[in-house]
Amino acid sequence: MIMKRTIDEITGSSRLRRTRKFGWTRRLVRENRLSADDLVWTVFLCEGKGVREEIPSMPGVYRFSVDVAVEETLRAAGLGIPAVAPFAREPHSVKTEDGAYITNPDNLVNRFARDLKKQTQDIGLITDAALDPYTTHGHDGILRQGEIVNDESVEMIVRAALSQAQAGSDIIAPSDMMDGRVGAIRDALDANGFQDVAIMSYAAKFSSAFYGPYRDAIGTGGLLKGDKNTYYIDHANSGEAIREAGQDLLEGADMLMVKPGLPYLDIIQRFKQAFSVPLFAYQVSGEYAMIAAAAANGWLDRDRVMMETLLAFKRAGCDGILTYFAVDAAKKLQQG
Ligand code: PBG
């Protein structure tokens, strides 16, 4: 006898494989499920008409001109995706030191908002109020003598939020990490008749190398002077993320987001335990690129890894996921 004890003696007759035996037992005991309702589609906008430009570092993801983006978003709504989050590649000619073009009613995001809302109320619109697509230096706030100045940046971000709400945004999602911006945005929305516009705080936005392909996609990568370490959270910290989220909720955030996603599942789980509020993760560009690159080499099964990562966010405690995979995943879910 090789083994000192029988398996039943070792496990006390518990056999976890009993519930794994058949497809129906696995379905019966499954703890988490992904549905199209969990997906927010992140979309890149660019100038022009009829434009679909594939992003080299994100194969399968495109920059769309506003007309195409609206069409594609209507299709996404048809697949059951509840919300879309646009990000703009603005031409260099509109960029300034202070990023004021973010408040222009005719910038890409605001045009997309108006055109989409003319077509449908069946899909929610989540807009980012950070300045980086609009500044000559690629920072999310205003740069003065080498420093991202907090309070002046918040004023511009508040004006941005108002112009987005005016254009039809349903949820303002400030990704800039300036102190006090959630409360300042809430005050301004309320004072201007936008009491029903919600705030999804990028409460835990970490300083991360996973944003690289996004910066290629919106053309801010080459512009960025220095790094964002003085305003994004150090990725060594988790207690600080809890403090940030608690603060944002006190200031009036309706929902929380963790970004990036997969390397930060521990943060998601801590948020889920600490706060009873809708919780989201942003599966960012670098996460998408890693999967797409490995799949292109035949090293990973793209669809299976996509579904596994999205379900992992649910398991960790997310109510939803902002993801470049939203349309592909919704199609996959529709096929069953
Ligand atoms: C900046 C912003 C970033 C992303 C969205 N808005 C990060 C950055 O450029 O520093 C990243 C999204 C992604 O990587 O998919 N406000």
Image (cartoon, rainbow, N blue to C red):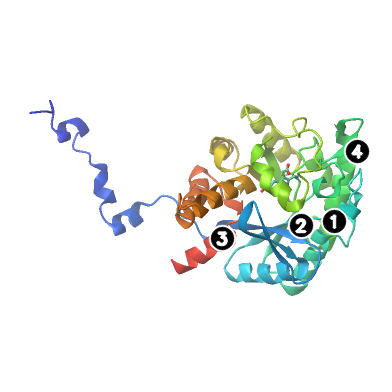
Please state if 128 lies on the left or on the right of 105 as rendered: left
Identify the residue under disc 2: 196
The residue at label 4 has a CB less than 8 Å from ligand 1 = no
**The quarter of the displayed image where residue 111 is located:** bottom right
Question: In the depicted view, which residue is nearer to us: 307 or 243?
Answer: 307
Query: Is label 4 in contact with label 2 (beta carbons under 8 Å)?
Result: no
Percent position of residue 77, x then y: 63, 68
Label 1 is placed on what type of residue?
A: Pro
Query: Is label 3 in contact with label 1 (beta carbons under 8 Å)?
Result: no
Disc nearest the viewer among 3 and 4: 4
Secondary structure of the residue carrying tag 1 is loop
Residue closest to the far left = 1
Q: Residues within 10 Å of mark 2 (few under 14, many from 20)?
A: few
Identify the residue under disc 3: 37
Identify the residue under disc 4: 152
Q: Earlier in the sequence, mark 3 or mark 2?
A: 3
Label 3 is placed on what type of residue?
A: Asp
- Whole-angstrom CA distance, mark 3 to mark 2, is 21 Å
Label 4 is placed on what type of residue?
A: Glu
Label 2 is placed on what type of residue?
A: Asp
- Whole-angstrom CA distance, mark 3 to mark 4, is 37 Å
Numbered tag placed on residue 91 in the rendering: 1
Please state if 243 lies on the left or on the right of 149 as rendered: left
Tell which quarter ligand 1 is in: top right
Secondary structure of the residue carrying tag 3 is helix
Q: Earlier in the sequence, mark 4 or mark 2?
A: 4
- Whole-angstrom CA distance, mark 2 to mark 1, is 32 Å
Q: Is residue 335 visible?
A: yes
Question: In the depicted view, which residue is nearer to us: 80 or 193?
Answer: 80
Q: Earlier in the sequence, mark 2 or mark 1?
A: 1
Q: Does 65 sit above or below residue 236?
A: below
